[in-house]
Image: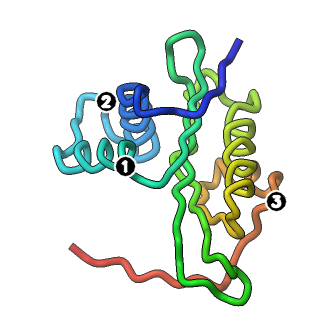
């Protein structure tokens, strides 16, 4: 039976392990390739102090899925008078457990928690694999956003 739970600071090693697994898979990085100390330190710090909620899906002691909602407070606008928004990221299910509703359950938990916190908009960057799930949950495409990425 799969257990779903909101991660706490006591779950730090599970959070870090699942995030690194997800980064390896999503970015097609070999498992023997390591990440920078900077990425590891900032990821750990964000899980400790960031305004976020992460859901873990566990099969026994093994994390088989994770999803994170990062809360963002922006200047209030007409459409978002409290300025509370969120960004969904790191939605991941281990390959052997995909297509069983795990990601849907994790994302639904996060959405319900966001609405309870007064969030008025949730954004995300969808992969082609994830797009059908997000559409099923009511997410739509947007033409409103432009992005500037700092080149390195």
Image quarter hosting the N terminus: top right
Tag of residue 132: none
In the rendered view, would you say 22 is above or below 142? above
The picture places residue 12, in percent across and down from the top left corner, at 37, 30
Query: Residue drawn at (50%, 12%), measured in percent from left and top?
Result: 61
The picture places residue 39, in percent across and down from the top left corner, at 25, 49
Label 2 CA crowd tier, 10 Å (few <14, some 14–19, many 20+): few
Mark 1 and mark 3: span between their CA atoms? Answer: 30 Å
The picture places residue 151, in percent across and down from the top left corner, at 26, 77
Q: How is the image coloured?
A: rainbow
Query: Residue drawn at (41%, 26%), measured in percent from left and top?
Result: 10
Mark 2 and mark 1: span between their CA atoms? Answer: 28 Å
Q: Secondary structure at mark 1?
A: helix
| Image quadrant in which you'd find residue 123 | bottom right
In the rendered view, would you say 106 is above or below 71? above
The reply to whether dot 1 and dot 3 touch (C-beta < 8 Å) is: no
Q: Disc 1 vs disc 3: which is toward the camera?
A: 1
Q: Disc 2 vs disc 1: which is toward the camera?
A: 1
Query: Residue drawn at (53%, 78%), measured in percent from left and top?
Result: 74
Q: Nearer the viewer, residue 12 or 151?
A: 12
């Amino acid at each position: 039976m799969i257990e779903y739970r909101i991660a706490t600071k006591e779950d730090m090693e599970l959070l870090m392990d699942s995030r690194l697994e997800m980064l390896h898979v999503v970015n097609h990085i070999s498992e023997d390739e390591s990440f920078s100390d900077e990425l590891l330190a900032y990821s750990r710090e964000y899980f400790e102090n960031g305004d976020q909620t992460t859901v873990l899906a566990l099969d026994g002691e093994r994390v088989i899925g994770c999803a994170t909602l990062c809360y963002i407070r922006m200047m209030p606008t007409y459409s978002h008078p409290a300025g509370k928004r969120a960004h969904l990221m790191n939605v991941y299910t281990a390959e052997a457990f995909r297509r069983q509703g795990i990601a849907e359950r994790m994302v639904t938990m996060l959405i319900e928690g966001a609405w309870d916190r007064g969030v008025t908009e949730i954004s995300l960057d969808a992969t082609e694999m994830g797009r059908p799930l997000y559409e099923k949950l009511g997410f739509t495409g947007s033409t409103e956003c432009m992005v500037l990425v700092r080149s390195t």
